[in-house]
Image: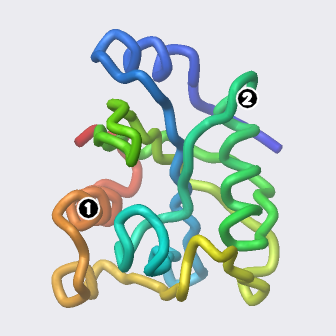
Amino acid sequence: MTFDTDSASLLDRAAADGNEQIAVGAYVSDSSGRVLLLRRSRFEFLPGLLEIPSGAMEDGETVAQALVREVAEETGLSVTKIGRFVNHLDYDNDGGRRTRQLNFKVEVNDLAQVRLSDEHSEWLWMSADDVEAVGLDNAMRGLLIDYFAHPQSCRCL
């Protein structure tokens, strides 16, 4: 598995910006360029929210390990490649801790094998044309607009 981003500098910058926790997010796309989104179940923090596969890093994990684990836990898919850093999002988690989510482009095994955990109730594919039409919160909409508008550059929100 390759990993072409200097994650140490991303972590250092997040800490310097006052973030107490790091989360990772994965842009999983199909052959048409659509992005996999998951809807949070009604019993989770922010129920109904559409999001990319994501979650907090655990103690002792690297960014790459956290990406592999989160994608597997939330979708049942296996990451085969971790690509470029795409963008980030700062937010307060359910415990009130300031968190930076670092989002990366990843490749996975068989996309037909999506299996959701209890954390999510459904999954869907989102194209650039769907971003304004589907009920996204402002943060996710901004991240996706950025992802689709700048496919080769690194952008931060």
Q: Residues within 10 Å of mark 1 (few under 14, many from 20)?
A: few
User: Which of the image's four quarters has the N terminus?
Assistant: top right
Is 114 on the left-hand or right-hand side of 52? Answer: right
Look at the image and tell me whether residue 21 can be seen: yes
User: Which of the image's four quarters has the C terminus?
Assistant: top left
Asked whether 90 or 111 is in front, the reply is 90
Q: Tell me the mark number nearer the camera, choosing from 1 and 2.
A: 2
Quick one: SS at disc 1?
helix
Query: What is the x, y in percent for residue 128?
Result: 30, 78
Q: Amino acid at mark 2?
A: Glu
Is 68 on the left-hand or right-hand side of 33? Answer: right
Asked whether 99 or 89 is in front, the reply is 99
In this rendering, the answer to whether 119 lies above or below 27 is: below
Q: Amino acid at mark 1?
A: Ala
- Residue named by callout 2: 61
Query: What is the x, y in percent for residue 146?
Result: 26, 56
Query: What is the x, y in percent for residue 43?
Result: 48, 74
Which mark, residue 78?
Answer: none
Image point (74%, 50%), residue name: 68
Image point (81%, 63%), residue name: 78
- Residue named by callout 1: 149
In this rendering, the answer to whether 69 lies above or below 49 is: above
Upstream in sequence: badge 1 or badge 2: 2
Q: Residues within 10 Å of mark 2 (few under 14, many from 20)?
A: few
Is 16 on the left-hand or right-hand side of 4? Answer: left
Image point (33%, 31%), residue name: 98
Q: How far is disc 1 from disc 2 in space, using C-alphas?
A: 31 Å
